[in-house]
Image: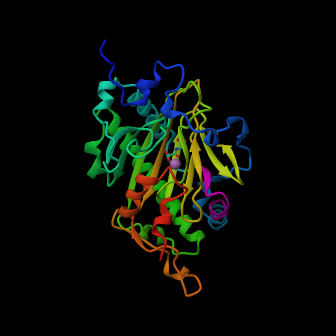
Amino acid sequence: MMAVPSKLLLADIAQNCSSIPSNFIRPISDRPNLHDVKTSDASIPLIDLQGLTGPGRSKLIKEIGAACLKDGFFQVKNHGIPEAVIDDMLCVSKEFFHLPESERLKKYSDDPMKTCRLSTSFNIKTEKVGSWRDYLRIHCYPLEDFVHEWPDSPPCFRQVVSEYCKSVRELALRVLEAISESLDLERDFMNKVLSSHAQHMAINYYPPCPQPELTYGLPGHKDPNVISLLIQDGVSGLQVLRDGKWVAINPEPYNLVLSNGKYKSVLHRAVVNSNSARISIPTFYCPSSDAVIKPPGSLVDQEHPSIYRSFTYAEYYEKFWDHGMNSESCLDMFKAT
Ligand code: OGA
Ligand code: NI
């Protein structure tokens, strides 16, 4: 009998397995302990961005600053992204992951430096244990540089995703202004330090998993960018570490979850479940490759020297893909000597 060729994408592996393949099983000391997770409650910060225009602005900026300082993430409503744009984005993503295997494989790559690729787990070239996820990762700013690389199936993919990317970028810029002000920096401080800016997006697809206690959709990590803006379908899975406890951030329709690395980058993870596939779509707003990462001059003096040497975002990004999910942070590699 001929050996069945092994499948590249998890969606096609997961389809007919009743237990998870051994390369997905985490050691006992590193499992999700799902019974030990708190469900989100009213204490999860929810920020109404309506107030950004008008007399309530400075109060809202304090609220955003407090959420960044204490939690490193918050949810937003009245964020200006039309509900139809979110619905269409989630819908076309679901359609994409339900395309025939041969169609999806056209975009497959295991090279993290590719600007448009469908891949699986995190980085199969460097990791020891797999994660229960397939993902399409694309670059989306400037749109005209990248849109031609994106999938052209489903036929409306490029148009729907472009609309979403434009809306989410406007939101990111407004929030970055608020964050700059909350740090007593000029309103356009973040805008300026990001050089010519970049925007990446993942569309994560987590198939149902027969043994969700043994594996992760994504293990605990910190995102390697300035701010992440996430939408999710109706299925739970996102968890953040808060006061030493994992807390589930259950989906609220049309709310976005934001996290950022300026104050404190929140440790978060995705878990899977045995009933439903799940889609989440994080946008990673980031500096362009040439941007130099260093603390603002106003925060450094003889008593508070730079902890890290300065580095370009390109250097940092490459290290993240080599080491990202294995360690707390790859920043250690940039410690000043
Ligand atoms: C990520 C991520 C969380 C989720 O893709 O970086 O943290 O809920 N995703 O899928
Ligand atoms: Ni993340």
The image quarter in which residue 98 lies: top left
Q: Is residue 246 left or right of residue 264?
A: right
The image quarter in which residue 19 lies: top right
Tell me the residue at 67%/65% (across/down).
59
Q: Magenta region: which residues?
A: 65-78
117 is higher (above) or lower (below) than 323: above
- Placement of the N terminus among the 4 image quadrants: top left
190 is higher (above) or lower (below) than 232: below
Residue placed most toward the observer, 311 or 51: 311
x and y, in percent, of residue 46 in the image: 66, 51
x and y, in percent, of residue 126 in the image: 41, 46
Q: Is residue 207 left or right of residue 263?
A: left
Tell me the residue at 27%/32% (across/down).
106
Tell me the residue at 40%/70% (across/down).
311
x and y, in percent, of residue 63 in the image: 67, 62
Tell me the residue at 31%/31% (across/down).
105
Residue 71 sits inside the magenta stretch: yes
Report whether residue 255 is seen.
no
Q: Is residue 144 left or right of residue 54?
A: left
